[in-house]
Image (cartoon, rainbow, N blue to C red):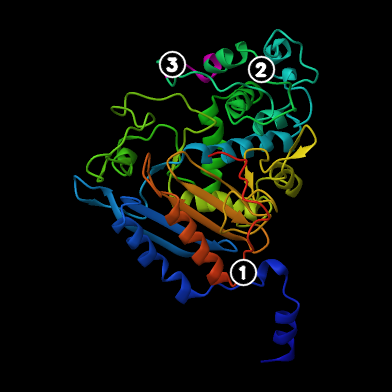
Amino acid sequence: MSLKHLLALLFVSPALAFALDAAKLSTIPLAMEQAVAAKQAAGVVTLVMDKGKVVHHEATGMADIAKGRKMEKDALFWIASMTKSVNATAVMLLVDEGKLALDEPASKWLPELGQVKVVGGITPQKPITLRMLLSHTAGIAFPPRKPTDGAISLKSYVATLIKAPLAFQPGSAYEYGFGPTVAGRIIEIVSGMKYDEFLTKRLFLPLGMKDTQFNPDEAHRARIARTYKMDEDTHELVPGYNPFVTSDVTVTHMPEPAGGLFSTAADMGRFYSMIAAGGELEGIRFLSEKAVKDMTTPVVADGKSLNYACGWQVNTETQRVCSAMPVGSFGHGGAFATNGWIDPASRIITVFLVQNVLVPDSGKPKDTFQKLVMEAAGIQVKPAAAAKKAGKK
């Protein structure tokens, strides 16, 4: 080895210092097969990226048990609350352009927010900001489920959300809910575009996320992985209800900024790669580095630091969302056990896609998967100082 090459290795940047062990990565499929055999999932798609390159992408098990349809790597999944990170990124596109600001009163763009009251008819002490909406600290109460959910427009749905009194003073507490949905409506107002059209034009098409959408077309519907739950009596996996998979392609669901997207592992990998690289993908800048950092920095409510940022869950010293991933890493989970995670220090990305609802131990395969990835990278993940997990999926 030449002196030049040796010096290059010695002074390599921290983000390039990790090399994943291919042998260790090759054990992931067997681990997922064992999870399927244990009925922790019907089928799984896993993806690992290292500094923007795919180093692992596999499918295990079945996408539809009754039809004998095997899980494929390009299977489509309802990613649920993983959508929140995409939504926040769309907001930051407009922040970078100077059309929105995280800490100005959001009533500047949605005047109705200036009329809200805290429960009991109390006037808010602080104005609601986009940062509060995206981090679940605005006080927007979790709404009761209604038959009209998903059937009305985003505009009408947000109008119903903000008519309800706030659960607490803005910025004083954390309650997982639909603040991000209100932020999504603000995107429509400022851009002059329908929400799903904005995301398609400004994010999905430029990033090459060709399979990501709110209402899958006929071809994509054929690739949707079936949702499964465990039968309480037989202990077998049986089809479970998914409100976002409509009866047919002509019946559409309202684009839900807090959790309505369908996507693939490959598409989400491209999205996370852009974030992991500080807002760039393949030489094209989408977001400023400041925007990425601002969006993924945990917020403070009533003087207490949370493990939630603007649309992203974050592993902190005392609050660990993904126990197998390092402190400082971030991502988001979804209601049906999906998960996407980024370690910015090594630029390692993990994507875990499954469709589980009411399946015991459904989180174990994801933990095993991420643990194997960290072992492959030679990264020792120390136990969290406390087991408390503040962020919900």
Residue at mark 2 = 166
The residue located at (74%, 43%) in the rendering is 294
Judge left or right: residue 327 versus residue 48.
right
How many other residues sit within 10 Å of disc 1, few (<14), some (14-19) or many (≥20)? some
How many other residues sit within 10 Å of disc 2, few (<14), some (14-19) or many (≥20)? many
Range shown magenta: 151-156
In front here: 126 or 306? Answer: 306
Q: CA distance from mark 1 to mark 3?
A: 46 Å
- Three-letter amino acid code at disc 3? Lys
- Mark 3: secondary structure: loop
Q: CA distance from mark 1 to mark 2?
A: 43 Å
Q: Is residue 245 visible?
A: yes
| Whole-percent x, y for residue 132 in the image | 70, 29
- Three-letter amino acid code at disc 1? Ile
- Mark 2: secondary structure: loop
Sequence-first disc among 1 and 3: 3
Q: Is the Cβ of the residue at disc 3 closer than 8 Å to that at disc 2?
A: no
- Three-letter amino acid code at disc 2? Leu
- Residue 155: say if magenta: yes
Sequence-first disc among 1 and 2: 2
Compared to residue 180, the image places residue 345 above or below, namely below
Residue at mark 3 = 146
| Whole-percent x, y for residue 32 in the image | 37, 60
| Whole-percent x, y for residue 227 in the image | 33, 40
Compared to residue 349, the image places residue 16 above or below, namely below
Q: Is residue 54 visible?
A: no
In front here: 347 or 2? Answer: 347
Residue at mark 1 = 379
Q: Is the Cβ of the residue at disc 1 closer than 8 Å to that at disc 3?
A: no
